[in-house]
Image (cartoon, rainbow, N blue to C red):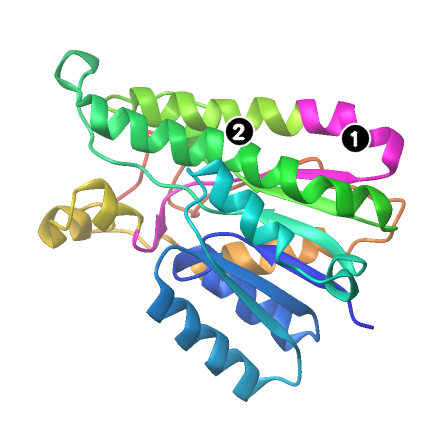
Amino acid sequence: MTNYAFITGATAGFGKACADIFAKNGWNLIITGRRQDRLETIKDQIKADYNIKVISLCFDVREEQEVIRAVESLSVDITSNLTLLVNNAGLAVGKGSIDSGLSDDWNRMIDTNVKGLLYVTKAVVPFLKANDNSQIINIASIAGKEVYPGGNVYCASKHAVDALSKAMRIDLVQYGIKVTNIAPGAAETEFSIVRFKGDETMADSVYEGYTPLYAEDIAETIFFAATRPPHVTLNDITIMPTSQASATVLHKK
């Protein structure tokens, strides 16, 4: 049976593009997200386009019991072939100085980007340990390498992802589980729409004057990392648009 990839946050952006490229290359999928209607639409489209199996699980990664119930609902024939976890679900909410921050925004970022990643990983790791050539790919950010003005809590949450990737690698090496940390720079997805709470003018301004990364760029990198030979692990990949030199240095025309 073809192996399964478990992809969180698969209803948009990196997660959806990731589901597409793995399906195109014959992987079976477990796709997750909070938006049931969009999740089912993507599931139906992928099944129509590719001859693979797709399982959809609707839950919020911030809710540990929802995560546990969803993962426990998977049958043995699926979990015995689950070899890849892509921890993609994440978000930024708000951008401003620490003294003007909203605790609700902080909680959403920490609960999703850090605690959600932990809940899903803990639930899925037992299957990865039991299956050969398994891997975890965590989607971090350039914000997990550098701190920029107004980024405070989002940067802290992605620094945590970077650290957790290193910790997972140490904890799981004895089981032969690869752990890859992927840190994208500026990428045009729903990211800025969410960050600026639906303000499309603000979101669009982030990508003016240069060519950003696109979701497909990151999905291709994820797929490449997931398909290296068993003895090869890409530990940490930072991906930037050519016009971006650091978190804060962009060449705009």
Q: Which mark is drawn over residue 172? A: 1
Residue at x 22% of width, y 45% of height: 206
Residue at x 41% of width, y 29% of height: 143
Q: Find residue 138 and report its horizontal and vertical position in percent.
A: 58, 40
Residue 253 visible (yes or no): no
Residue under label 2: 161
Left or right of residue 165, residue 187 in this image: left
Quarter occupied by residue 26? bottom right
Q: Which mark is drawn over residue 46? A: none
Left or right of residue 94, residue 40 in this image: right
The numbered mark, 2 or 1, whose residue comes first in the sequence reads 2
Q: Amino acid at mark 2?
A: Val
Q: Is residue 188 magenta?
A: yes
**In this orientation, which residue lies closer to the viewer: 115 or 67?**
67
Badge 2 element:
helix
Q: Amino acid at mark 1?
A: Leu
Q: Circle 1: is it few (<14), some (14-19), or many (20+) Cα within 10 Å?
A: some
Q: Find residue 137 and report its horizontal and vertical position in percent.
A: 63, 44
Q: Residue furthest top?
A: 99
Q: Are marks 2 and 1 in contact (CB under 8 Å)?
A: no
**In this orientation, which residue lies closer to the viewer: 83 or 180?**
83
- CA gap, disc 2 and disc 1: 16 Å
Q: What is the magenta range?
A: 167-190
The nearer-to-camera label among 2 and 1 is 1
Q: Is residue 148 magenta?
A: no
Residue 192 visible (yes or no): yes
Badge 1 element:
helix
Residue at x 41% of width, y 42% of height: 90
In the rendered image of this protein, does residue 169 appear above or below residue 220?
above
Quarter occupied by residue 87? top right
Q: Circle 2: is it few (<14), some (14-19), or many (20+) Cα within 10 Å?
A: many
